Amino acid sequence: MLSSDGAAVGFNGVALGRSQVYGTVAEAVCVQSSRHRCPSTWCDCGFYCFHDAESARALACDEQYERSVLLEILASGRYVSYELGLRYQRQTVRSVRVGRCRCGRTAAALDDVGGGIVGWRRLEPVCRECAGRRAVLSLEKFGTLAGVPVSGDEGGGYAPMGPLAPLSDSDRAGGPADVGGRGPVPDDPEAEIPLLTAEVTLLQARLDELQRRLGRLTDRP
Ligand SMILES: [Zn+2]
Ligand SMILES: [Zn+2]
């Protein structure tokens, strides 16, 4: 999250913690009751962490968490153990790792995506291509404001995936013949002649018409 005056950054919970923005060093707050200390054994409040990053990446496959960033933290204060990690009172963020842009490319910055809360804009990882010429917050700038390093994180989970090889000429089914929206060109190259001739005639007619219109517009005294 980026503060509305642009002077500070913070983090926002996903589910119950959605109403809270916390900084690099923060105390857990219970949104359900102020009458007990966080984390309470009869409440589900407190910060939550996993013991290892892979569990966090697995959680991020779930739709609800896929736009979140991965925080490496130091937990302190009171704590309660649960199956995969700790629920605890105080945390210090050590590093921030951001996943991919919505389009699937590697993130290069953070973008204001709307859906903020009073005083805070919500940011999401964005790649160079999707950011285009829009104003975005660089990962370095976010890191400076947060006081911790920020880097891209894709884990090993994407390792089996890669870009498709470019189409070969034989896959392309005859270049200009595609202009007319027909199917693939027949195997026999001779059979292409009437198709290409028809295509050229069509283009020639279109060109003649455009030249006539251009002539009418520019033929002024
Ligand atoms: Zn509580
Ligand atoms: Zn993108």
Image (spheres, rainbow, N blue to C red):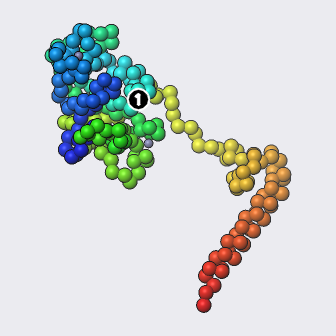
Q: Is residue 203 left or right of residue 217?
A: right
Measuring 77% from the left and 48% from the top, which residue is drawn there?
A: 185
Q: Residues within 10 Å of mark 1 (few under 14, many from 20)?
A: some
The one nearer the camera, 100 or 174, is 100
Ligand 2: which quarter?
A: top left
Vertical position of residue 61 compared to residue 81: above or below? below
Quadrant for the C terminus in the image: bottom right
- Indicate the position of residue 126 as horizontal and vertical percent values: 38, 41
- Indicate the position of residue 40 as horizontal and vertical percent values: 21, 12
Q: Can you tell which quarter of the image residue 122 is in?
A: top left
Q: Mark 1 points at which residue?
A: 66
Measuring 25% from the left and 29% from the top, which residue is drawn there?
A: 20
- Indicate the position of residue 109 as horizontal and vertical percent values: 34, 43
Q: Can you tell which quarter of the image residue 8 is in?
A: top left
Q: Is residue 217 visible?
A: yes
Disc 1 secondary structure class: loop
Quadrant for the N terminus in the image: top left
